[in-house]
Image: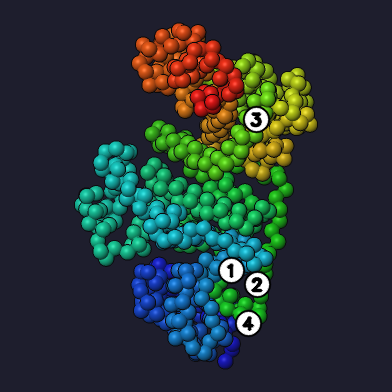
Amino acid sequence: MTPFVIGVDGGGSKTEAVILDVVGLELGRWRDGSSNLHIVGKQGVREALAASMQGAASAAGVDLSQAAAVVWALAGAGRPDDARILRALQAELLPETPGRVVPDAVAALVGGVGARFGVVAISGTGMMVYGEDGRGASARAGGWGHLLDGGSGYAIALDALRAIARADDGYDLPTRLTSRILSALQLPSPQHLISWLYAPERKPDQIAALAPWVLDEAEAGDLMAVEAVLQAADALAAGVDAVARQLALKDAFPLALSGGLLTGNAFYRAVVIQSIRTRVPAARPMPPRADAATGAALLALEMLKQPLPTDKGLEQSDGEEIWASEQRNVLTLDLDTRTTLELVGLMHLEDKRAVAAVRPVLPHIAAAIDAIAPRMKQGGRLIYVGAGTSGRLGVLDASECPPTFNSAPGQVVGVIAGGCRALTEAVEEAEDDPDSGAQAMRDLAIGPLDSVVGIAASGRTPYVMGALTEARGRGALTIALICNLPAPMSNLADYVLAPLVGPEVIAGSTRLKAGTVQKLVLNMLSTGVMVRLGKTYGNLMVDVQQLNAKLQVRARRIVAQACHISEEEAQRVLARCDGDVKVAIVSHTLGIDPDAARQRLQQAGGVVRSALQNP
């Protein structure tokens, strides 16, 4: 008899066994029902595994008991308690055969990539991302089960059902999902979803089975369906990002896309690939070379001393590919044919994703603020440098600091390629001149106490790169606010703030999502620094300039709120303190005269809370 091995892949919806000979040629395979321990129980798992292996053996014309090795790759095998049960079952069913039980994701990686290096993203009934670095380390994200995971068929279906409920309640947009799913389930009204969904016999795979209909409606443009699909795609991308970071995969690595939804639906696959490429530029998405059952069989061959490769040797990028913000968005390829509601709805959904893209960058933003503030306390400046939309946003944020925080003139400065004329009209050629950017820094006499923030969606604008290079050479703190990675500007900055928003609704129009996140980050930078400089007391703008009637009323209200007094009394306190809000708060709260309050504030560096607390 020709020596052979058995590989089994089992999960929530199916159990598939494959027989390979010792050179990897497939001899037979068979599929049976679920082998998820928590869905069908121990006996159900036993029956599914026995049936699938025997079916494959019959198809191959071999005696199952003569297998040289067996590997079961099963959902839940990564949990110690489940693994013990599954290993006992394996010993019971194949007592004479050397075997292993591994998580299904391991076999999906080996089958998908053909090596013990790379990452696999699985989206079917459930979701899992798993990776290995080729040196023995592994990492996973997801696999928490249908109630906790995003990016799965179950999650897509549940989001769609929620959308139907919201639409029926009248507080969200109407959706074609209502008629599509009700028709598919043969239910007369949305209210009947309650009894269907919560029926005791309802299984996760039955709910996940709704996902293909949601994908169909998303591809046809239904906004609620699109939102459900985007949430799933972004959850998968976040999982790939987490695994890549855990394994320190900074260079190009293969990413196999596995599971029924990813392999069976081209639209979903395209959306997921776009999301992953945006968030994890080093990933190289690919269709799986083989399925997880074959991957399990390859692991069985590995037990026979036929080692798998540990690195597929992917070519590194030459840096010339179109960066993410210039690529075409797969959701808006037919934008000009959409209804106006669909047009603005797609923009809204992409804006929501843009806001979410800031979240992974929050620790870097906080670190930058904590680096800028001490320099500004010593007299340093915050300088924004950009071109086009990026430059205008920098000038806007800088111009709003004096009225909001009473910052000194020149403390926060906005520099735009092309000068003041570029604020109101396009001076496109100005951004291509790095020498002008460098000269702008020399004109400002940038020094070691200054902090220079280069703003450029592409991360490669010559004017901004010239400015950062000059500022860095002068010892200034440098920060890059960019929306693409990899990017040359990241090599010129002490801190890189890179909210990755991906392709715009209109390709290359970075005034949209990229401009939105740049404004959000600039808000955080300037506000965070000013809070650290003592420009607020709690959430009150205690350094507000009272330059008009509205701001005078605001100053009176701030004192009243800070001191827990009426606005009439606050007006009298302000009058005694020459209109100085900080002095008024300290004077009234501590019951001291204005001069004493001013002295305490001076000793506290202008920080109200410190002035109130220090003896």
Which quarter of the picture shows residue 571? top left
In the figure, 437 relative to 176: above or below? above
Precedes in sequence: disc 4 or disc 3: 4
Per the image, the residue denoted by label 2 is 308
Q: Which residue is drawn at the image coordinates 51% and 58% (left, top)? A: 141
- Name the one closer to the observer, 163 or 56: 163
Q: Quadrant of the C terminus?
A: top right
Residues at badges 1 and 4 in contact (C-beta under 8 Å)?
no
Residue 110 shows which numbered tag?
1
In the image as oriented, which residue stretches furthest toward the front?
Answer: 615
Which quarter of the picture shows residue 112? bottom right
In the figure, 437 relative to 599: above or below? below
In the rendered structure, the answer to whether residue 468 lies left or right of residue 527 reads right
Precedes in sequence: disc 1 or disc 4: 1
Q: Secondary structure at mark 4?
A: loop
Per the image, the residue denoted by label 3 is 374
- Specify the amino acid type for callout 3: Pro
Precedes in sequence: disc 2 or disc 3: 2
Precedes in sequence: disc 3 or disc 1: 1
